[in-house]
Amino acid sequence: MSMARLTVVMALALAFASPAAASFNAAPTVATVKAAEGRTLAGATSGAPQDLHGFLLRENDKRKTTHTFPRTPAFSWSHVKGARRYEFELSTSRSFADNGIVWRSKPQAAVATVPITLPWVTGAKYSWFARVRALVGGEPSPWSKPFGFNLRPPSAPRSLSNGINPQPGMVRWTPVPGATAYDIVFLYDQGQSKSKRIRSATTAADLRELYTFHNGFPSSQPVFWRVRAVREVVGKTKNALPAVSYGPWSGRFRTIEPAFDNGTLSPLGSISRAGKTDVFSAGPTGAPGPGPHGLSPGFFWTGARGPFGESFGDCSVLSQLFGITCPLYHVYVFTDNTCSNVVHVSDLVGSPAYVPRLTPPLDLPTDGKGLSAAPGVFLNDGSEGDDVYTAGDERIRASGVLDESSTDEEAATSGASDDSDAEGSEDGASSGDSSSSEPKKNKLSTSSGDVELRRNGLWDLDWPSARYIWTVVPVVPQIIPDDPSNPTDGKVIYKDVVFPEDMCAQGKGFGFGKTSGVVTTTESGVPFASGLSPAGKVVSSGAEVPSFFQRVVVAWKPAVGATKYEVQFSRKKNAWKTLKRKFTPGTQLQARLSPGKWFYRVRGLDLSLPGNPGLSWSEPVQLRMTAPTFSIVARS
């Protein structure tokens, strides 16, 4: 055979190669491939794909018994010989009625990942159904037997604040895997339907509503509250399922607040819970227990007098006029131990604790009339107003920026994915759009109106070489009378009584660390990865450096606080150069990779952070992609 003819034959072999046409040992000949195509064109019909199943981390994850998943799974099935593409459908209808279809795609291999987050839905037996069929020579096979499954949230959070509150002024609960936020409802008077809902990105909430302007109210009285996990659904389904899904509400928790301490103001510590144990930091050194905080912590303290014995005379006047008890508090967070470089200023709270919220600050009174009514109400969310000042008479605002329709998310992710090997979604289903049962993604609808959510988290630092310093100062409201003869009628301003630098100088500036959790991509050194064998079968990784052909599905365990994930691929581990970059709301991602050695890494995106939402990268994981082999048979 001439060299020219050999080149032509090899080119034809590569052009018509499918996963089933490549093998390590016994590669089909070009004549075999042509004969198979001839039988298809002559009217032979391929059988339906078999063994359709779902998985979370690897293709062989207990697939014979697993029909319930806590988050969106990936799907795999047996390869149909000669198939170069499949049609995959996901539905809430066993009959796959058009109004039940939530996702359609045309994967090129016997595996499908769903690049949208599906809400938690459960049925009497199954509430979700998947099916697939092969396309061989342009002709569809019969549909596979449907695979039924449920998406069920983990159990509701458990209270860490039952009985006498160990951290007065805040309530805390256990984390729910996969949750992106939590809704908390305070039940002031359930018999009269009096309650208030807030949202938190962490596993704690302060009791500012119960304390502010009536600090004596919670003393020895129970606080009733409930909490549920929120999982933001990213992407638009074909039939417009709601864009936010919730876990079940917890039972009604009962927390007893101890008597309010009016002694000298003293910080006690910062606390958080991102895993199975608490992280507690106390004292000027900030030495943590199990490690640095994985989520933005809650801060708590005791006392109401300043470090030099300040008794805050304005509070006694307001108490006589309106029955108001003081003070309010500001928490300041610094990056230096001299307490000069402020990076976070808390909302004004009356509670002896502060936890950053996604919902707005309290709607503080701005005039004497509103201030006189404050002791008899629980304040709604709103604005602290423009008249909040430091002890140095500088105007300040609470930290946090409005979540402007996911602008930060779009800036971080738009135009950055290599989607040239996308699975080919159809019918308007999109991983970039979202539909919502609420007015907007960045708003929370409550009985008191729509409140705008904000980004109000704390960034990671390189603990223990770097740390935050925090302290707390008292704040008092003051009335600026419009008429000197009527001292109760006028504008209300709020002013710090103590400089935070003075608190730090007195040894009351406490340190703490903040380091987000790393995404888990392996177990016992073996990656959570599945991919094609040269015969077109989907197989799971079984070694520290697994080998696959053409396509791979990488997976990971959800990271606390992450709303989306970024996956990067590189040819080199140390001199990292990103050649593919993809974003997904799920915990699996499918990629087509050329032959050779590859590395990938994963990180979560915490969209409660102002600015860059990127969390810590996982350690790079190595893969090897195998090149196809072909047998060339010369004709006589």
Image (cartoon, rainbow, N blue to C red):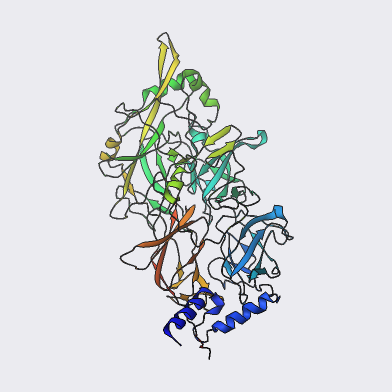
The answer, for residue 196, to whether it is visible in the render is no
| In the image, farthest residue toward the top | 485
The residue lying at 52 percent from left, 63 percent from top is 588
Q: Is residue 519 above or below residue 493?
A: below
Q: Is residue 563 left or right of residue 480?
A: right
Q: Position of residue 526 (x, y in %)?
A: 45, 73
Horizontal side of residue 413 vs 573, given as left or right? right
Quadrant of the rendered image containing residue 47: bottom right
Above or below, comparing residue 364 to residue 614 in the picture = above
Give the residue displayed 54% in from the left and 82% down from the top.
30
Which of the pair 77/564 is nearer the observer?
77
In the rendered image, the vertical position of residue 161 relative to residue 310, given as above or below: below
| Figure quadrant of residue 515 | bottom left
Pick whichever, 264 or 544, lies toward us. Answer: 544
* Residue 206 placement (x, y as % from top left): 48, 41
Q: Is residue 594 visible?
A: yes
Q: How many marks?
A: 0
Residue 607 is left or right of residue 506, and the answer is right
Position of 392 relative to 30 (above/below) = above
| Position in image of residue 158 (x %, y %) | 56, 52
List x then y, in percent, for residue 306: 33, 32
Decide which of 404, 379 is in the foreground and name it.
404
